[in-house]
Amino acid sequence: MAQRSWMDALTDGQILRDWVSLFGSLWFSLFYITLLALGFGVGGSLSLILIGLPLLLFTLAGTRTLAAMDRKLNAAILGLDDEPDTWDDIDPRGANLGERLGMYLGSGVTWRSLIYLLLKLPISVIAFTLCMLILIPLAVEVLILAPLTIDMRLISVRALHFSAVNLHKLNTLILPSPKGKRRPSRLELVEEEPRYVLDDDGEIYVAKRKV
């Protein structure tokens, strides 16, 4: 594989993806914290008169969704195609309000997702600081030194990518991932109804499914 040049760094979009990941992390984190504070604050305070229970349930479910969504979003921005899905440990289908609340409150994924979103704030502050500090050396190396054939081996570009990827991986250590298992799709979770066939002797039998 050919060594990456400064022209590649300017045109392949990786610099922009890495910088956007670091820069946007802080604003997404503030948005998540605001939603969680409103959801848990209002839902928890109104739960004594039962009005807040649906909102509390929505916030608990939304915590898991936000964490999984943020993980996949950052992986997509950084171009990490091997990012695993967050493991889901409950199936609330058919359960009533109280049962669903118990499932979400007793789920480790719910609390790990909450820790992930809370931990994202200090990590995003570090990320935002790095993306600002690296702008000057990045511009000097790629826009000035490289065209003058002064080879710095894309040190600032590598540092930007290293920071973006590893801060993302540091945050996602909190979330559980399936190990050695493939999560079934929604279509696979739906039970297929048996198909009955009439043979030449007039007997009915269940047809075998095609694999």
Image: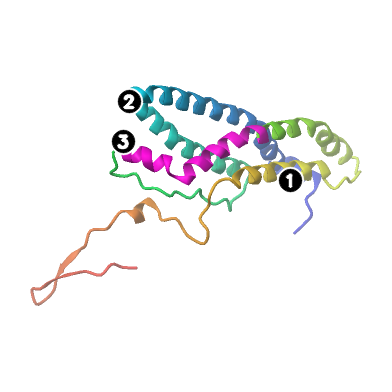
Q: In the rendered view, does 73 fall on the left or right side of 170? A: left
- Disc 2 residue type? Leu
Which residue corresponds to the image point at 45% horizontal and 26% vertical from the top-left?
39
Of labels 1 and 2, earlier in sequence is 2
Indicate the position of residue 174 as horizontal and vertical percent values. 58, 45
**Which image quarter holds the C terminus?**
bottom left
Indicate the position of residue 101 as horizontal and vertical percent values. 37, 37
What residue is shown with label 2? Answer: 50
Of labels 2 and 3, earlier in sequence is 2
What residue is shown with label 1? Answer: 162
Query: Circle 2: is it few (<14), some (14-19), or many (20+) Cα within 10 Å?
Result: few
> Is disc 2 placed on a helix, strand or loop?
loop
Labelled pair 3, 1 in contact (Cβ < 8 Å) = no
**Which image quarter holds the N terminus?**
bottom right
Q: In the rendered view, does 93 fall on the left or right side of 69? A: left
Does the magenta portion include 113?
yes
- Disc 3 residue type? Leu
Q: Which mark is residue 97?
A: 3
> Splitting the image into 4 quarters, where does residue 61 fall?
top left
Q: CA distance from mark 2 to mark 3?
A: 11 Å
- Disc 1 residue type? Phe
Q: In the rendered view, does 62 fall on the left or right side of 119? A: left
Q: CA distance from mark 3 to mark 1?
A: 45 Å
Magenta span covers which residues?
97-123
Which residue corresponds to the image point at 46% horizontal and 27% vertical from the top-left?
40
Q: Which mark is residue 121?
A: none
Q: In front: mark 2 or mark 3?
A: 2
Q: Compare residues 204 and 70 and report the one nearer the observer.
A: 70
